[in-house]
Amino acid sequence: MTTWWWDGHGHGSNPVPFPFGTSIINRHSRVVASICEIDQPPGEALDYPFIGAASMQILNVAPDDTGTVWVWMSINWGSDVNWRVVFHIET
């Protein structure tokens, strides 16, 4: 099993592609994903995970043969927030 993370920003409810490549992902891969907000403490990198006021959900996770993991994410907030999705992948 390997662990990866992907940082981004946004809001709303949408399917989001995460292109890992065919050497890592195929339709038989087992993928677990979690999501949290991330922040940037003064003088540090944007990599501090926390639970903020925005509710966040991973609704569906589907790996495919193009090496992409499709994740339906829902971020219930009126404007973009910084997020991190952590993946645990077993091929």
Image: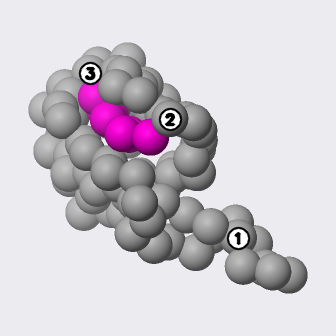
Q: Is residue 13 left or right of residue 45?
A: left
The reply to whether residue 50 is visible in this rendering is yes
Residue that numbered label 1 is attached to: 40
Question: What range is drawn magenta here?
Answer: 69-77
Q: CA distance from mark 3 to mark 1?
A: 33 Å
Q: Secondary structure at mark 2?
A: loop
Which residue sits at x=28%, y=28%? 72
Near mark 2 (Cα within 10 A), the count class, few <14, some 14-19 or many ≥20, is few
How far apart in space, not on screen, are marks 2 and 1 (Cα)? 20 Å
Q: Secondary structure at mark 3?
A: loop
Query: Does residue 56 sit above or below 36 in this rendering?
Result: above
Residue extending farthest top = 66
Which quadrant would residue 61 be assigned to in this image?
top left
The x, y position of residue 11, in whole percent, is 48, 34
Q: Position of residue 75 (x, y in %)?
A: 38, 39
Foreground pick, 79 / 33: 79
- Label 2: which residue? 78
Query: What residue does disc 3 label?
Result: 64
Residue 73 lies in the magenta stretch: yes
